[in-house]
Amino acid sequence: MNARVARPGWLVPAAVAVVLTLVVALGFGGGLLAGGASPSPIGTSVAAAPSGVPSVAPSGDVTEPTPNADASAPPATPSPSPLPSAPPPTTTAEVAIVPVTSFRSTRTAVRPADVRAIAEGSGSLDALVLVEADADAILAGLGQDRAAFGRRLVTVADAAALAADLASHRARLGFLRADDVDASVRALAWGGKALFGVDRVAGLDAWPLRASLTVAVGGVPDYDPARAWTLVAGGDILLDRGVSLALGAARRGADYMFDGGTVDITGRCKDCSPFGWDTPYTKRTGNAGLVRDLVKGADIAIANFENPAPNRFRFHGSGTVFSANPAYLAGLARAGIDWVSLANNHIGDAGRTGILQTMANLDDHGIRHSGAGRNEARAHQAALIDVEGVTVGLLGYDTVAAYYHAGPDTIGSAKMTKAALRRDIAAARKAGAEVVIVFPHWGVEYTTRVTARQERLGRAAIDAGADMVIGNHPHWVGAMEVYKGKPIWYALGNLVFDQTWSIPTMEGITLELTMSGTELVQVRIRPHLILGKAQPNVMDPAGSGREVMNQLFRASDGRLPW
């Protein structure tokens, strides 16, 4: 139950029964207004006239009695309208409040000093936005008052209006009840603690920011970090070619992939790649193992597996035919990868038997998968994962390599069509999925452009009942869309890949999603840069990561209202 008080509308006041006086005049016996006459005025109940007595119509005309009616029947008694229900009782309680800003902001945290700076008219934030009903209590919780802010305090009617204001004014800071935070705003850390995400506090008691607000008596907060769960999603993973050299020949081992920390781009080498692209000068800034902590800390971690891992693999030093050493799957498993999609344009590179062997090898390492199978029916079957009492269904699809698609009796990948989406999502729901995630391989390589086909299929997935769509294949970070309130990510870029010949192919994003039950309540987008041909390292979104974040939002123009 939401802690905010619901104020139901009052019902229309009870109608008052009107008693018509019987009038005897000029030989007529007056009667009650007939039930078969014209509709009575609003708010008035009128009883039916007894049979055998002429009745007076609303116009004043006399109508004849209804023949064969029971003259002895008493007049009908109007039923009283129900009285409006009383609003639920309320009380005042200490409620968790959260600093929020625009979804597109690169901020990750704020401090009390930032709030004071708004009041003083200094700093990078130019206004404080609050819901009017909660404003004074939140200001008190922050140790502030209205007078200090003057015109730099903006109040709005509700949480939705606050989110819309932040979307239009990206240099503003807001505060919301934790229950009112949703994915359209970016929740920020306070006092070194976060209420959402992999590193969130263990429970509401550990959250330092509260205000005395009106709540329903006996109400339970909708959002509790102790009951929330997280999903981390990454892009394309390759374990052949340059990645294999980085792990095997360099003797770094499979764990190297997720040992990355943080990195800065310090400059550009102009036209330094063999393909004429700029490449970055970089500096590692510490925090080794941060990527592993993020992936392993999530309740579910997912990605696209861009190659088969058959029993008889073959190393490829160049080209675009891949097969991976299945021993490297241990590195994915130890890092916490829970599920991979096998629906892509390389899954059949080791033959159709290689697909089945890849599935078996993933099973041996405890990594779930979908998007491919021994026949069409199996390829289109969702993988189901249970987390915090919620069943999540994951469906992988390919639109690129029709030659690898499964048939009724043919091993292969799942072909993405509108009909398949409707059928497969319905089957996943019937099997118990409460959250359905569609993971397509689609689009055009090395571009942020969304094709008309991608748009149709992405929206069709939502129309068919998917809760979100997370796509890959272009090897660049692409657009994000919100369609009917549900997110579609068209491309996350590379996660573990050897395409270190350009900045766009070295950069990618990792999604850190916080769910409360079946509801997406927060999205954090973490930009990264691949070093050593195999290892993603996190970039500061306000620093070196700004370029790829801007690429994402430029590609999303007209698609993303947040």
Image (spheres, rainbow, N blue to C red):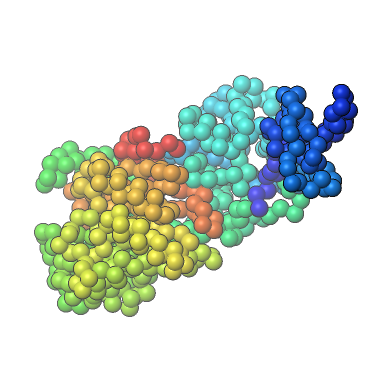
Asked whether, in this view, residue 455 is left or right of residue 53, the answer is: left
Q: Position of residue 91 (x, y in %)?
A: 78, 46
Placement of 93 over or under 267, stated as above or below: below
Q: How many marks?
A: 0
Quarter of the figure with the C terminus: top left
Identify the residue at image location x=25%, y=42%. Answer: 452
Q: Quadrant of residue 245?
A: bottom left
Asked whether, in this view, residue 43 is left or right of residue 524, the answer is: right
Identify the residue at image location x=59%, y=24%. Answer: 152
Towards the viewer: 364 or 268: 364
Q: Position of residue 558 (x, y in %)?
A: 35, 34
Towards the viewer: 387 or 100: 387
Towards the viewer: 188 or 177: 177
Placement of 553 over or under 532, stated as above or below: above
Identify the residue at image location x=48%, y=36%. Answer: 102
Identify the residue at image location x=15%, y=39%. Answer: 271
Placement of 550 over or under 307, stated as above or below: above
Q: Quadrant of residue 269?
A: top left
Q: Position of residue 363 (x, y in %)?
A: 33, 76
Q: Quadrant of residue 399?
A: bottom left
